Image (spheres, coloured by chain):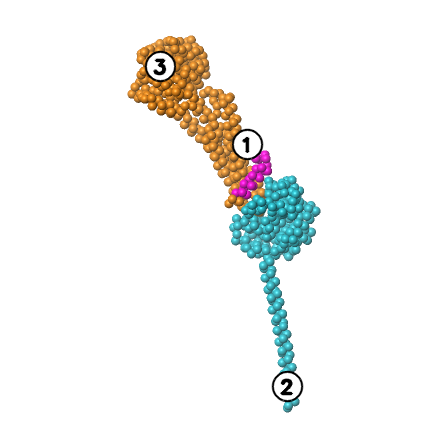
Chain colours: A orange, B cyan
Amino acid sequence: MLEKARVSFFLASRSITRGNKGITIFTVFVLTLIFIQLVLFSSMLAGVTLKFNELMVNFQTGNVVVEPKEEERHIEDASALQKKIESLPQVVGTSARLKTTGNFRYKEKEIGTTIYGIDPADETFVTGLEDAIISGEFLSRPDKGEIILGREVSGGFGALMESKSLGGVEVGDTVELTIGGVTREFRVKGIYSTRFFMADASAYLTKADLEELMGIKGRDFAQEIAVKTADGTPEDDTKTELLSLGIGENIRTWHEFAGILRLIESTLGLVRNIMNAIGLLIAFVIIFVVIYVNIVNKKRQIGVQKAIGIEQNVIIASFVLQAMLYAGAGVILGYVFVRFGLVPYTVSHPVEVPLGSMSLRLDNAEALNRAILLFLSSIVGSVIPAYKLAQKDLLDLIWGK
Amino acid sequence: MGQIKGETMEKIRKHTEDAVKIMDKIRKQTENTVKSMDIIQKSTDDTITDTIIEGIDITRTFKMGEVEVRALRSVNVRIRRGEFIAIMGPSGSGKTTLLNQLGLLDTPNSGKVIIDGSDTSRLSESEKGKFRLHNLGYVFQDYALLPELNAMENVYISLMMQGKSKTECESAAAEILAAVGLGDRLQQLPSKMSGGQQQRVSIARALAHSPEVLFADEPCANLDSETSKEVLDLFEKFNQEKGQTIVMVTHEEWHAEYADRVIRLKDGIVQE
């Protein structure tokens, strides 16, 4: 058994090292491209998912969100709770927000959206909203009667749902806001764009203004407290520690909070699996054709090998080993190209997509999975033609028929 | 009366003496016959044990489209151990077909090939492969070397397949390549060798595992006269010095002069 494997490996290695260099380079090149294609799509989707996650954390929820208890509508004594949360060393900042829905009116247009009442100073510690201002300025604590709008509300600035916006509000314009039957005019102080549709379809005003509109002035209420933690802190650990502080409010990590993102993630996962299956099928066909052509050219050699007594399964194994070595080289080259070339390049030169700047993200476990699938394809793609040919009549092979 | 009686007695004595003489002659002749029978029996026994290949009633038919070509028609051949046989005949006479049957590269439609006492018609394809690996060697018209293996590797590939160690393989290959005059070209690839050199590597490959029979199908067809002579001299050397049985197809009369015996074929029938 071992000597047969030795002969197969010997024939395969000699065929690769001393065979037609053009065929070897072409085969490895094709397999490298196939591997890159298999990995790249996953990396792109992983990059998109990661971007979604970043946007969610950076512009909406922070890492952990504290919400009212099940049966209550508000968090009471929000400032005290904020201080309690901020006692944890990993917490970078907290933002107690009032959250409601309201109707905007500007000229003939009217839209409903989510309104947040925030302490602007606290908010800057939790989200990157201040940096997302694309026109005008961010709110400041003493502001009164001023508001900032997401681009999906204001319209213009490349809004994705322009027709459902106010149709081009600009900084300095006045908009009417109605909450719970109370209407007030607000001057637009700034317009922001996070490129995250969910975040851009909101508006922010100071907590004091919203308390007044909602008729809860001086009650120190909040609908949610967004908590930002230091980079690299696992959200579940923070949640556990908050619970151990005796906080009875509903605590959710951003991932638990963002149900829609999980939906998008699983949809993208499904698309990725379908694309992978198609990619593998294409890979199998290409491997089959390349190896078949290679083997057909060696018909006479196979005949001579059989004539001098080399066993058929040893000959087949030598071609399968060759295909596996080609696949191995393709996987290594493809991995090196993606891991040390493409991924770092897109990190330093992010690709601009509607979501924002996106870079590729290579998951090693997925890359290993694709490598195994490529190996399996190369085994099946080489066994079939090699077996078919080695089965042929000896004289037909020798005569090259 | 007494005189008549004496004459009669004398006649009887003479006849008796004659009868004894005749009996002696018959006895002597019988003894000679028995001796001759013994000699014939011994000779027959010797012939049977010395036979390395016996082809019995071999018929091989090929289908070429709708036409059926009978390449061999009930061919019977017997080749003794150590013999150098040339198979000759005009084109299409069935020379190569006969070589392929005797060398187990093809299977006859009927008849059988017995090699060293083994009836090969009972062997499966994989058993035939093993039989070829251990017992037979081949030299093809176009050398048929594996282009990706160097001279030494081409020679020891079948030894590797037999399970020999790398050292054994290399020393055996080096020895046989030296014997064919290529001791200084062990690492040379076939593409870097002349036709004659390639054919010598091919001979070394065929002989490396000390086969019972070496089959050569027009080994000099692609070589000039001088190189052909070198190759045939090699065959002669291995035949005479090592007692190597060789079966060679050729269409050149002067090649056949190297052989001990010529099997002539015409239209698939042995003419010899």
Q: Residue furthest left?
A: A71
Residue type at numbered disc 1: Phe
Q: Position of residue B210 (x, y in %)?
A: 60, 50
Q: Is B125 a magenta residue?
A: no
Q: The numbered mark 3 sits on a residue in which chain?
A: A
Q: Is A11 a magenta residue?
A: yes
Q: Which residues are magenta?
A: A5-29
Image height of A125 relative to A291, above or below: above
Residue receiving disc 1: A29
Disc number at residue A102? 3
Disc 3, SS: strand
Of circles 1 and 3, the one toward us is 1
Q: The numbered mark 1 sits on a residue in which chain?
A: A
Task: Give the alpha-carbon distance from disc 1 to disc 3, as whole Å.
Answer: 58 Å
Residue receiving disc 2: B8
Task: Give the alpha-carbon distance from disc 1 to disc 2, as whole Å.
Answer: 121 Å
Q: Position of residue A39 (x, y in %)?
A: 48, 29
